[in-house]
Image (cartoon, coloured by chain):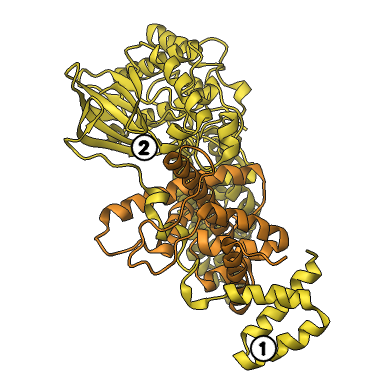
């Protein structure tokens, strides 16, 4: 059908739907004389046109919420094959997880009901089986062991070791982990990942929610062998790329490209950073990470102090945007962490960090902003007194100083708050406002020196206050601010681009 | 809807958020209530976008992705379920589950998806509109806003697309 024909059908259809039956029939009959085919098409559409029948009026997923959202539900006490459901313990993208009892062996297991697509789609099923088989061969104290992949009552269930304890996500809720406990946790996690990587298995969704701290203090990684291929994207399904969790996914995974061990290395870097500091290295929410991806911008780790000297370069290397600049797998990460524990020294081949850590320096930079803000805010007060010596000039001087000081103080406050609440954007923000701010402050310095010259001799006290303020401002602009800014690394692009 | 890779990567993310919200809605739900369609998209939008909505392309962009995600997941699941019930051949699922009082006639979701694909060939704008309304749950006014056309135009297109799709699903195409 040509676009022209389609338009004609649309036009006639709308024309006749607004007419009453008699007028409609008359128009159609008349038009049929010249274009019978058009009228036949419109008549068949009119036959299907029933405005009141509710067709498509309810959104698909409101009409069929179970189809859209629900997983098959099993109730406590129910039997699924040989497994007796005890309770639901979790729910995620890969389905519902139950605590269950294996009635044959009388042991507790974790039973994960996988989405129905895995039971029905032979390709996915095959891949899942292959991955589960590989993951089941992994035995490592930091990895929850997989027992079986069972088809029960038409659905697939992954049966694994039941790990009791709390997730690192819950532990993080109480704040960062310190000292030796942090280092041993990281070594356990890197060890688990390294064992998997050696066996050619990539986790793809490494995050605090997938790690459980057992009562004995050790950690265990859950959900190996579950390539989280999203049901909603056929392309990802076909090439086997997995969906992870935004905030833990490196750029290549966000972009839907192939993932490998270096994907886990990145996620490990994020998790380790969170455990060490209690904050996300990119201050990132899902939306911010997506934003970075959409705009093709580099993500920048925020400046904080890590509690263990020598840990930062290791984590920054895990967090490189470019996969080829990261550790090739978790094995070398483990080696560097172990070296750090043994010697407390810097791992080889990594440049030593600068003397002042950016976290402390940022604090000084903030102090600098506040102090200078106070100095500049006092300038209009000082120039107010100049009016006594020359009322006309003095008034003008006061007004100009007031205006410039307002600009400067407002800008510095803005930068101060940006550094407190939105650190990743501080560099851009500062670059935008710095020329205006520095210009205003340079003029302020000159004006104050000029007015000091005006009143000098009559009132040396006022003159010296004015000179002090002017010199303090200029010294700050020329020397102190560049130093604190450089130390806090506000103007440089760390750590990866 | 563009086919850029970033958008592809957004689909599962948006859907995951929708599903997470829907699951909590469904758990809270009392018998007799139905899922509030637009509330879900709104909440997902607010959650995912609350940091810097202006940096994300815009609301319309989000709605289009949400609608497209929904379409893909529903069709895929309908296919899977059909295959499960019928042992493989020619999966067909009617969209009647969860209906209260049977107000709408049941119809074949997979067939609708195929018909929508044909409508896309004829009139991409109308097909997009159906995707936003039926799979995205947007109202006439929201659809108008998302597509940057007037509500009156949305209504006209909607009427036509509905009639065309109803006829396609009934299977009586004139020769």
Examine the rendering and report whether any part of residue A378 can be seen.
no
- Name the residue carrying label 2: A95
Q: Is residue A381 above or below residue A10?
A: above
Q: Can you tell which chain is drawn orange?
A: B
Q: Residue at x 50, y 52 (%)?
A: B70
Near-viewer residue (A460 or A46): A46
In the rendered structure, are the residues bearing label 2 and label 1 in contact, judged by CB atoms less than 8 Å apart? no
Q: Residue at x 63, y 90 (%)?
A: A19
Mark 2 and mark 1 on one chain:
yes
Q: Residue A282, how many percent across, how many down?
A: 49, 38
- For the N terminus of chain A, which image quadrant? bottom right
- Name the residue carrying label 1: A25
- For the C terminus of chain A, which image quadrant? top right
For the residue carrying disc 2, how many other residues have a C-alpha within 10 Å: few (<14), some (14-19), or many (20+)?
some
Query: Which tag, 2 or 1, sits closer to the chain's start?
Result: 1
Q: Is residue A135 above or below residue A378?
A: above
Near-viewer residue (B38 or A31): A31
What's the distance in space between the residues labelled 2 and 1, CA to CA? 56 Å
Depth check, mark 2 against mark 1: the one in front is 1
Disc 1 is placed on an element classified as helix
Q: Residue A210, how many percent across, how many down?
A: 36, 29
Q: Residue A119, how many percent across, how many down?
A: 43, 32
Q: Residue A308, how many percent across, how many down?
A: 39, 21
Q: Can you tell which chain is drawn yellow?
A: A
Near-viewer residue (A57 or A132): A57
Chain letter for mark 2? A
Residue A140 occupies quadrant = top left
């Amino acid at each position: 059908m040509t676009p022209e024909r389609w338009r004609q059908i649309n036009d006639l259809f709308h024309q006749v739907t607004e007419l009453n039956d008699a007028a409609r029939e008359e128009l159609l009959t008349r038009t049929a004389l010249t274009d019978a085919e058009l009228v036949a098409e419109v008549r068949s559409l009119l036959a299907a046109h029933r405005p009141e029948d509710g067709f498509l009026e309810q959104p698909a997923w409101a009409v069929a919420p179970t189809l859209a959202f629900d997983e098959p539900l099993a109730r406590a006490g129910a039997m699924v094959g040989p497994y007796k459901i005890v309770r639901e313990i979790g729910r995620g993208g890969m389905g519902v997880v139950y605590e269950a009892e294996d009635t044959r062996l009388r042991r507790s297991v974790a039973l994960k009901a996988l989405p129905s697509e895995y039971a029905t789609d032979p390709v996915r099923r095959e891949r899942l089986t292959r991955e589960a088989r590989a993951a089941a061969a992994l035995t490592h104290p930091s990895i929850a062991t997989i027992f079986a992949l069972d088809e029960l009552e038409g659905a697939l269930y992954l049966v694994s070791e039941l790990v009791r304890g709390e997730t690192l996500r819950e532990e993080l809720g109480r704040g960062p982990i310190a000292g030796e406990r942090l280092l041993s946790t990281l070594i356990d996690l890197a060890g688990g990942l390294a064992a998997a990587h050696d066996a050619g298995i990539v986790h793809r969704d490494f995050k605090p929610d997938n790690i459980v701290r057992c009562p004995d203090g050790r950690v265990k990684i859950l959900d190996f062998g579950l390539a989280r291929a999203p049901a909603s994207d056929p392309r990802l399904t076909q090439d086997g790329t997995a969906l992870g969790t935004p905030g833990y996914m490196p750029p290549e995974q966000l972009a839907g490209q192939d993932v490998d061990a270096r994907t886990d290395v990145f996620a490990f870097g994020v998790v380790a950073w969170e455990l060490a500091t209690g904050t996300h290295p990119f201050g990132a929410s899902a939306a911010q990470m997506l934003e970075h991806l959409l705009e093709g911008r580099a993500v920048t780790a925020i400046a904080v102090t890590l509690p263990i000297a020598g840990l930062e370069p290791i984590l920054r290397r895990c967090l490189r945007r470019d996969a080829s600049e990261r550790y090739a797998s978790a094995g070398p990460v483990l080696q560097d962490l172990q070296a750090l524990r043994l010697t407390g020294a810097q791992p080889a081949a990594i440049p030593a960090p600068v003397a002042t850590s950016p976290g402390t320096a940022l604090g000084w930079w903030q102090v600098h902003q506040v102090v200078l803000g106070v100095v500049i805010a006092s300038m209009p007060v000082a120039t107010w007194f100049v009016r006594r010596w020359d009322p006309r000039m003095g008034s003008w001087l006061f007004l100009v100083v007031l205006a410039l000081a307002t600009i400067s103080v407002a800008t510095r406050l803005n930068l101060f708050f940006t550094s407190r609440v939105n650190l990743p954007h501080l560099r851009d923000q500062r670059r935008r406002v710095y020329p205006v701010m520095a210009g205003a402050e340079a003029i302020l310095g000159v004006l104050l020196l000029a007015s000091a010259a005006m009143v000098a001799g009559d009132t040396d006290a006022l003159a010296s206050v004015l000179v002090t303020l002017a010199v303090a401002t200029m010294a700050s602009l020329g020397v102190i601010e560049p130093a604190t800014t450089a130390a806090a690394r506000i103007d440089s692009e760390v750590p990866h681009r | 809807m563009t086919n850029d890779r970033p958008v592809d990567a957004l689909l599962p993310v948006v859907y995951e958020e929708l599903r997470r919200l829907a699951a909590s809605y469904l758990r809270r739900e009392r018998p007799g209530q139905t899922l509030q369609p637009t509330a879900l998209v709104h909440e997902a939008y607010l959650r995912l976008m609350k940091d810097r909505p202006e940096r994300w392309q815009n609301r319309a962009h989000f709605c289009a992705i949400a609608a497209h995600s929904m379409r893909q997941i529903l069709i895929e699941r309908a296919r899977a379920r059909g295959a499960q019930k019928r042992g493989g051949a020619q999966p067909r699922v009617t969209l009647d589950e969860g209906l209260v009082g049977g107000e709408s006639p049941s119809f074949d979701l997979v067939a609708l998806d195929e018909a929508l694909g044909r409508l896309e060939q004829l009139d991409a704008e109308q097909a997009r509109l159906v995707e936003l309304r039926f799979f995205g749950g947007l109202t006439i006014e929201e659809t108008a806003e998302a597509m940057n056309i007037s509500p009156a135009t949305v209504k006209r297109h909607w009427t036509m697309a509905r009639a065309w799709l109803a006829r396609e699903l009934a299977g009586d195409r004139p020769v």
